[in-house]
Image: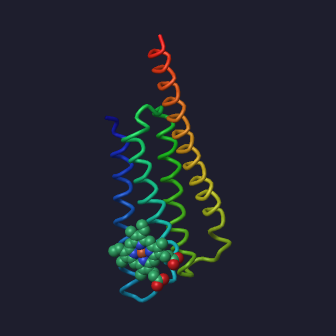
Amino acid sequence: MSRWPYVFFAAACFYIMIGVCWGMYMGITHDTATAPGHAHLNLLGFVSLSIMGGFYALLGKETPNWLIATNFGFMNLGVCLLAPALFLLLSQRVAEAQVVPVFMIGEFSILFGFLAFGAAVIGGLRRAGKARSGLQAFAAA
Ligand code: HEM
C-alpha cells in the first residue's frame, strides 16, 4: 500500500495534539475567545485530513502521486497559516489588517486542497465506471 494514507493520518495526529492542548488551555483559563480557531484546526487538520487519508487507503489507491501531493501540500499550508492567524486575531494580539494576507493565502490553499481532493474522487469514480463497463463487455462476450 502507498505511504500516503499514513502521511495524512500522521499530520492529522500532529494537528489534533495541538488542537486538544488548545482546548485544554481554553478550559483552564476560561477564555474561549479563540474557540473558532481551535475548531478550525481540529476540523481541517484532524477531521478533513483523516477523511482524505481514509479515502486514499480504501478507494483512491490509483490516484496519481502528484494529485495526492497537491492535495496534501495545499491542505497543510492552509492549516498552518489559518490556525495561527485565527489564534492571533481572536486573542487580539494582532490587528485584522495585519493578518488579512495570511487569511487570503490560507483560505485559497484550503480551497485548492479540497479541489485536488475532489479531482481525486472524480478520477476514482471514472476509473470505477470504466472497470465496470469493461467487466460488462467481458460478460457479454
Ligand atoms: C480534549 C479535547 C478538547 C478540548 C479540551 C476542547 C475544548 C473546547 C472548548 C473549551 C471550547 C469552547 C467552548 C465555548 O465556547 O464555551 C471548544 C469549542 C469547540 N471545539 Fe473543542 N475541545 C476538544 C476537542 C475538540 C475536537 C476533537 C473537535 C473537533 C474535531 C473540537 C471542535 C470544537 C468546536 C467545533 C467548537 C466550537 C467552536 C466555536 O464555538 O466557535 N474540539 N472546545
92 is higher (above) or lower (below) than 68: below
Q: Name the residue rendered at 55%, 78% in the picture.
A: 90
Measured from the top left, where is residue 97 in percent x and y? 68, 72
Q: Name the residue rendered at 51%, 45% in the picture.
A: 71
Measured from the top left, where is residue 136 in percent x and y? 48, 20
Between 99 and 124, which is closer to the camera in this rendering? 124
Specify the farthest residue to the front. Answer: 140
80 sits to left or right of 6: right
Q: Name the residue rendered at 47%, 40% in the picture.
A: 69
138 sits to left or right of 110: left
Quarter of the image that includes the N terminus: top left
Specify the farthest residue to the top. Answer: 141
Q: How many marks?
A: 0
Q: Quadrant of ligand 1?
A: bottom left
Between 4 and 78, which is closer to the camera in this rendering? 4
Measured from the top left, where is residue 77 in percent x and y? 51, 53
Quadrant of res 23: bottom left
Q: Can residue 54 be seen from the camera position used here? A: yes
Specify the farthest residue to the right. Answer: 97
Q: Can residue 38 be seen from the camera position used here? A: no
107 is higher (above) or lower (below) than 97: above
How was the colour assigned to the protein in this rendering? Answer: rainbow
Q: Name the residue rendered at 52%, 29% in the picture.
A: 129
